[in-house]
Amino acid sequence: MLTAVLAETESMLAGSGISLVLDETTEVRVRQNRKELRRAIESREFDAASLRGSQGKALYQVSLQAFGDSRPGIPFSILDYPGGWLDPAKRAQVPQAKESWAECERHITESLMLLVPVDAAVLMEAVTPAQRRAVADLLGLEDVEASARKWARARNRPEHRDEPAVLLLAPLKCEKYFDDNGGKGREAGRLRQLVREKYKTIVGAVQEEAKDRSVRVVYSPIDTYGCVDLMEAEWVEVDDDGDRTLDFRGHYRFREIPPEVRPKAAATVMRELCRCVVSGQDAAEQRRADAARGVYELALGRKLETKGFWGALDYYLFGEALANRSTRLSSQQIMADAARHQEELTAVLKRMAQRPADERVEEW
């Protein structure tokens, strides 16, 4: 999914003079994901098992940077980890999960956005009572709700209330259910209805925990590849620590030869992140300018106050005058830089944030 997000973001930025910059570790991960997908395309056989999901914690560091600008860009940090880690029982069985979970929780509670991937096929292909019973476990609904509560509780704290907050529900692998990206599906309405039904308590929990602020809830069904179809849904009985339950296995194939990868609605993630930054940018820059103005006025007041002979001697001969002048000039420069930086940064972000949402995307 994150590979799709970054690929669609790059397409969205094409010709804008703005680049998506990845740090070295992120670039290696994304390159490996793309190589695996390229192998599947070249073999012309879609092997879902070869395109593995998250096997461990990964921190994706990306930034938006104007071409030729040597200053740091606009950074985003996206944490990816296996959904099974949300289950305390499963987490206890994985050494890496136990070691990393405290760091994951810190990232979750400090994040502007909580992105909840939803396996659309699991929701849509469950037809028997046994299959429908398995859906809650396969999607980890109880664990997702607990994590969402924790996130919303942190967003509701006084120090975070003036920051944006977005809960993004992202059904994945939606190709079969839509007809707007090369497919023939007519089940977009049913998918929306099922997501509303299954995630109603999670949305309610977020709203309950964030009573003192607003949280935007965005629904964005994503075509992760855009060139595959689900051909068969297989429900397999498995033994989960003595509990007999069902697991889901989807069998896919490319819908065209040669395949053309075309993710859809994945750029919603970056668009919403940019909207978060734009909404808070004016306030942040104003606070920074106000702070600099206060320093400047304090230094100016010190320059004009009556100091007496010894005071004046100390002020000029022992460097305070030079330091004061430097402080005033520095603060003036900070105010000017803040204004210019705000203008440039806002122009970059608004270009992303004001891009029309995909027709699939809804705000609930």
Image (cartoon, rainbow, N blue to C red):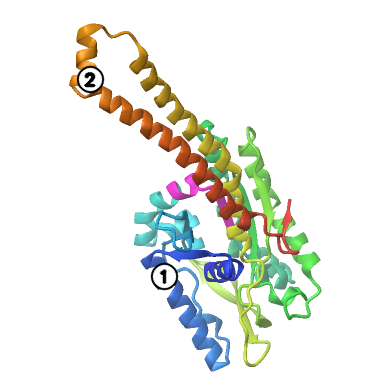
Magenta stretch holds residue 107: yes
Secondary structure of residue under mark 1: helix
* Residue interval drawn in magenta: 106-116
Q: Quadrant of the N terminus?
A: bottom right
Question: 350 or 9, which lies in front?
Answer: 350
Whether residue 80 is situated above or below residue 230 in the rendered picture: above
Kind of residue sitting beneath label 1: Glu
In the picture of the structure, the residue carrying the numbered disc 2 is 316
Q: Choose the circle earlier in sequence order: 2 or 1.
A: 1
Question: 356 or 226, which lies in front?
Answer: 356
127 to the left or right of 89: right
In the picture of the structure, the residue carrying the numbered disc 1 is 27
Tell me if mark 2 has few (under 14), some (14-19) or many (20+) residues whose alpha carbon lies within 10 angstroms of its own: some
Could you tell me which residue is drawn at 53 percent across and 34 percent down?
286
Residue 211 on image: x %, y %: 64, 34
Q: Which quadrant of the structure image shows residue 304?
A: top left
335 to the left or right of 11: left
Question: 130 or 282, which lies in front?
Answer: 282
208 to the left or right of 155: right
**CA gap, disc 2 to disc 1?**
54 Å
Could you tell me which residue is drawn at 51 percent across and 40 percent down?
339
Q: Which quadrant of the structure image shows residue 135?
A: bottom right
